[in-house]
Image (cartoon, rainbow, N blue to C red):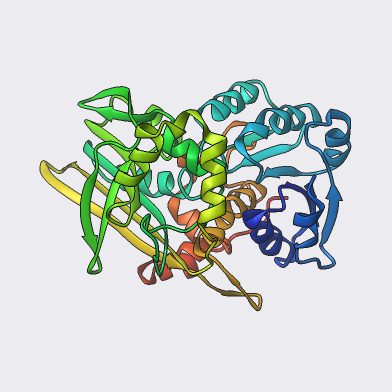
Amino acid sequence: MTQILLLGAGKIGAMIAELLSLSGDYEVTVGDHDLVGLNRMNVNSAVRLLQLDVTDKAALADAMAGKYAVLSACPYHLTPYIARAAKAAGVHYFDLTEDVESTRLVKELAKDSATAFVPQCGLAPGFISIVAYDLAKKFEKLHNVHMRVGALPKYPSNALMYNLTWSTDGLINEYCNPCEAVVDGVLREVPPLEEKEHFSLDGVDYEAFNTSGGLGTLCETLEGKVNNLNYRTVRYPGHCDIMRMLIRDLRLGERRGVLKDMFEYALPVTYQDVVLIFVTVSGYRQGRFLQETYAHKVYAKDLYGQIWSAIQITTASGICTMLDLLRLGKLPQKGFVRQEDCDFRDFIANRFGANYARPEDAMVVTGQKQEKVA
């Protein structure tokens, strides 16, 4: 059994622990300072609970001793403590952060590391980059890469047309921080909550606008190879204008703690959600200007006798797949590992990645055999 330290016993951590511990290949120690969160975890013979303050260097080192990998499902501001401890302990490192500065720190730590550092393993950043890069590789010359992702309530019922499905800190971070993009061939920063667009999918109207962090390392990977590359968050129409009023007109972007309190007081959590993934890539192949699109919706569903939200399933499946592929030798075994270093076919064929599979991906899922590396 592969020994894993999972830090963070929140909504995503609970799903990660469930997927890994019930796979038959992993034993998971779940660490969190919050006893209430720990006590909500589903416990089985492959799950151990540990009250742990990750800012306690000695305690964190003890928790990592003998582990194959550490998975962080903690808020992004705790990344420095966990990533540095992982390097010191010589264990593989994975996280879910969308925070650009945190990822830069992880990349720096990975430079001379004997173990793998694999940040941004969720939905966006994460799976969205794997999809986009897979489509991009099909073109001899790229033109545009457009990536759109939304985690939305299935039954919106308020003016924001939104419920909490994800980390509130992460949500505010995405709405307030500068965004990376390639514009007319030049890598640059663009403001969040701007460049709003409207589109329809399956008869439902949506809006999309700039948010921070969703591109992961793809700007760096495709810089000089693409004319325009951008990532935008998908919401129901009207959401962006209200957020701009709160963050800019009322200046709550300067008082993020107040904004967090408002969200968590007024917006209920929902497990009845849908994750929308929409990627469009255009370019040239054999002299012809072509476009390819990936579109998929993932819904909340019953797994292991319990309802899990779509954002729990997609985010947890992303990090569990990357861990599993590293263990199977299908990812670089040391240094900084980008999401686009993962082959789309390997991801979808994986037992955890199969949670993302569309009907047309069925042959990929069933047609590849995976064997554990000796």
Q: Position of residue 230 (x, y in %)?
A: 30, 37
Is 37 on the left-hand or right-hand side of 284?
right
Is 319 on the left-hand or right-hand side of 6?
left
Who's the residue at 15% across and 48% down the image? 290
Quadrant (top left/top right/bottom left/bottom right) for the N terminus: bottom right
Q: Observer-nearest residue: 175 or 351?
A: 175
Q: Observer-nearest residue: 20 or 40?
A: 40
Query: Does residue 282 sit above or below 296 in this rendering?
Result: above
The quarter holding residue 357 reads bottom left
- The answer, for residue 21, to whether it is visible in the render is yes
Q: Observer-nearest residue: 172 or 215?
A: 172
Q: Residue furthest front?
A: 250
The quarter holding residue 54 reads top right
Is 183 on the left-hand or right-hand side of 176?
left
Q: Residue furthest left?
A: 288
Q: Position of residue 59 (x, y in %)?
A: 88, 35
The mark tally for this picture is 0
Who's the residue at 59% across and 56% down the image? 316
